[in-house]
Each structure stands twice: as C-alpha cells, then as structure tokens.
Amino acid sequence: MEQSYGKLTHWLAFYLCKGLGVKTLLALAQKLPLEDLFTLSHEQLLALGLNQQVATNIAATNWTQVKHYETLINQADIQVISYFDSRYPPLLKEIASAPLLLFCRGNCDLLLSPQIAIVGSRNATPIGLEIAAQFAHQLCEAGLTVTSGMALGIDGAAHKGALASTGKTIAVLGTGVDIYYPKRHKLLTDQVLKNGVLVSEFLPGAAANSNNFPRRNRIISGLSLGVLIVEAEIKSGSLITVRYALEQNKEVFAVPGSIKNPLSQASHFLIKQGAKLVENVSDILEEVSFFGQNSLYNIEEPIESEPECAVLKSVGFEVTPVDVIARRCELPIDKVQTRLLDLELDDKVERVLDGYIKLGAT
C-alpha cells in the first residue's frame, strides 16, 4: 500500500521508533527524503542532529515487526494516514502532540468534514441517552458529522443518533481499529464501519488500556469544531476531552440538568466557567456557522516549551512520584498530571509503576 507521501513500510518504522515524533520528522524532511534515514549509518544520523538513542533506534529498526503490522493492516483493509498526507485532518494537525499516524476503517472522507464531538458519562440516565441521540441526529441533519469515542453510555447514544440520520459519524477508539471494545458495542461498531469511519492512533491489535483513553480524547476534540457534553461527573474522562478542547481553542457546549442529578455537575461547572448552555441544536449551529468546511480555527498551543517547563524540570532520570513532582514545581496535582500526559505524548517522560522518569534530551 502506497501512501500519498512515502511508503507504508517507512511510516510504520517511524511510528515504531521510540523518541521520533512529528516535530523531529518535520525538521528532518527539510534536509533529506525521510525514507533515506534508513540508509544512513549511526554516525550520519547523529550528524543530522538526532540524539544517540533515536539514532540507535532508527539504525536498529525491526523490519520483521514492521512487516507484521503491515500484514495486519492489509488483511483488515485498514487505511493509514500520516501527518504528511493530504488526507490528514487539518484541524487535528494544529493540536499539540498531533498523532503521526491515523489508522482508519471506513469512509475516511468524513475526517475532512466539519464535526461536533459529543461526550458524556458511561452510566448516563435514560433521558441523557435520549438527549445525546437527538442532538446527534439533528446535527447530522444540519450537515455536520458527529464524533465520539464508542464508549458505553453517551458515546454510544451519539453514534446511534447519527446513524439514524445521515450515518455521518466518527468513532475514535482507544484500541486498534480491528478490535471490538467494548464488546457490547460490536454491532454498533460494525454499523459505524459501514456508514462512518473508525479511527485510532494505536496499532492494529492494540487492546484496551486505561492509559490509551486520555490520549484518545485529545483526538476527539482535535477533530472537531466544538465539544458537547451531555451528562458527566466532575471527575470523569469527559472533562479530559473538554480540557483538550479548551486548550485547542474549540467551542464547549453543555446541556444543563437537574441540580439533584450528580451527572449534571460537569455541565453546570462548565457553564459557570463560560461554556455555552445549549437547549437545542440551534444553539450549537449559531456558534459554528461561521466556520465553513475548509475553515480552520486559529489554534495556539499553550504548552510551555520543554526547556522552560517546570513539570519536566521536576522529573528526574530516576523514578519520581507524582506528589514529589507537584511539590517540586509547586503546582496542583491535577495540573501536574495533565502536563505529564502531554510530556508523555511528546516522549519527554515515561510512565512507570511508581511515577515517571525523564527520557533523554531530544
């Protein structure tokens, strides 16, 4: 399978090379064709500005492993879209830590369509599920694509509502796109595959892992013009998606609920913080109507540069617990954990059993 920019074999090799990210590849692409990296010696790779570890990893590429994943991709009819591909969603390209590769099954054209993400609790109430499905249906009727995460509860209801309309829905998975998760959504996953598209940054065969889902959430918000939260508690994965949406300068919409319903807490909190209270789909459409299909937000990345990052400076090359990192940089633990996730995505730190360790300078 050829990609619009380079061979699939090379992109998989880059993906599997620890420490080699989009920023480094962008810089290298200014110097030479990226596939030429695999023809260079360790010394020549160092001369390009790569650090010892990345140069070693490239020189020692496991081509058997690359071939294994290439076979899985072809067998499952998976399309692979690289950051350098013209099919890569432009809004997603603008976020911090944009994924190098997207593994997709279904109608990839939907990735370039204007989208609204719908997120919420896995344990939603019947009325919450009804609201999510109705909003999804009406958004599709208005010409938008509905993006969510295929989780139980609100996610599933959003996908179902979209399928009942135009079928334009995107499921961003925390597993490989060839994996059914949760298993109760096998039929729904097949329906989305038939009418919409399944997307993941994880390799085929990747099983569900708790660390994958916060990473998945930045893609849900990154693809979308805005995020609608229907029902969720204050401490929930949905708020991670909202946090990413705010960092990405996206619109945040919230459906209010009863003050006696714990699942209204997140929506009410966000409304107090400035999210738009929505009662019907028109409240969303009037906010996003200014953004045409090919328009982009002017997205800024508020992340500190690595040399100035207080959290990164507080992580040692030995195992450093999160509470120690928070004490060193004098920041609340929730903010430290958020920043650590960003640093982990950029291969600056690595999560281990009792905390984090700093990786070598890039």
Image: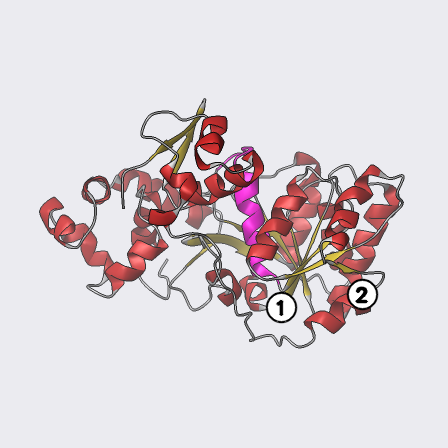
Q: Quadrant of residue 335?
A: top right
Where does the image place residue 76, in percent across and percent down from the top left? 49, 47
Cα–Cα span, label 1 and label 2: 15 Å
Color encoding of the figure: secondary structure
Magenta-highlighted stretch: main secondary structure? Answer: helix
Residue 281, disc: 2
The answer to whether 115 is drawn above or below residue 178 in the figure is below
Q: Residue furthest front?
A: 330
Sequence order check: which comes first, mark 1 or mark 2? 1
- Label 1 sits on residue: 114
Amino acid identity at mark 2: Val
Q: Tell me where residue 262 appears, x and y as whole percent.
A: 82, 37
- Magenta residues span 206-224
**Position of 337 relative to 137 (above/below):** above
Residue sitting nearer the eye, 355 or 80: 355
- Between disc 1 and disc 2, the foreground one is 2
* Residue 359 highlighted magenta (yes or no): no
Where is residue 350? Give x, y as percent: 39, 34
Is residue 324 shown above or below 287? Answer: above
- Dot 1 lies on which element? loop
